[in-house]
Image: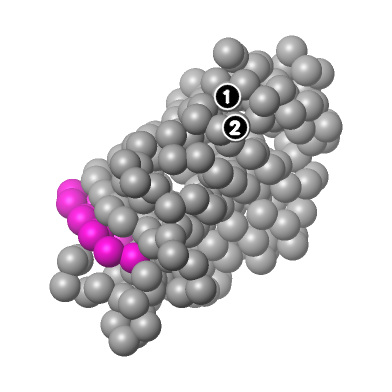
Amino acid sequence: NTYDVTKFGAVCNGVTDDATAIASAITSLSVTGGKLVFPNATCVSSTVQTINVPVDKAVSVVGGGAGVTKVLFTSAIANGFVVFQGSQYGGVHFEGLSVITNKANSGAAIALINSVALGFPVNNSLTDVVVSGDVAAGPHYWTSGIVATNVSFIALSSVNVYGSSSFSGTTCFTFQGTAASSINAIIANIDQSNFVYCGVGVYYGDWAQGLTIAHTNFQNGVTGVYTSNVTSGGTADQL
């Protein structure tokens, strides 16, 4: 199943608010799974876009390439995409797009949240994805770039996350579990990616285990990789 946001009324001219059209496409996606497709243009959303992955289905958010497909979020206090997984077979994939903001944004560009203990986790991935302000490393930024909570078997490949040259508080990628939950985050692989102007490039949080970083650069930031208190479930020995 493929859901092209332009078929639901998205104009994607970089000015018109396409939030309602995008949400309509997501409503259909959240029933059947499949692909949410954005054109080679800039689509605008004034609100968070929430995706509920249907039981035992996979969801992909797809563009034509991070350089040509952009989703611009214009709220200063909201997340961009929030994806809820509630099934052990419901994989999530983002590919070929930029998720940008034109504000000093207090939210996360992409937040992935799992609520099910996975016996045999499926793969989750972000490939050819850029997270930044509307001008990379300019005055606009996401406070959190990509956040994966209780999400296992996640891979980042060719992902660039930019903070701001005027703000040192962006956490570019967060990999974490939840102490109050029996669900932990297991295995994250980062390869051929870049984290620029990040307060923290990668936050390896509590109740998470198994982080591998290869062929990846941290530039003009404060801390490359931060590992939280190991007495609270952190597993720095698996970094």
Q: Which mark is residue 33?
A: 1
Q: Report which quarter residue 217 is drawn in.
A: bottom left
**Amino acid type of disc 2?**
Pro
Is residue 196 at least partly visible in the picture?
no
Residue in the picture at 46% in, 74% down: 179
Residue in the picture at 18% in, 49% down: 215
Q: Residue 185: percent from the left, percent from the top?
A: 37, 59
In magenta, the rendered stretch is 208-221
Taking depth in this image into account, of 103 and 175 the one nearest to the observer is 175
Taking depth in this image into account, of 196 and 159 the one nearest to the observer is 159
Taking depth in this image into account, of 121 and 22 the one nearest to the observer is 121
Tell me the quadrant of the picture where the N terminus can be found.
top right
In terms of secondary structure, where does tag 1 sit? loop
In terms of secondary structure, where does tag 2 sit? loop
Q: Residue 112: percent from the left, percent from the top?
A: 52, 50
Residue in the picture at 43% in, 53% down: 117
Disc 2 target residue: 54
First in sequence, mark 2 or 1: give its number: 1
Q: Residue 184: percent from the left, percent from the top?
A: 39, 62
Taking depth in this image into account, of 40 and 47 the one nearest to the observer is 47
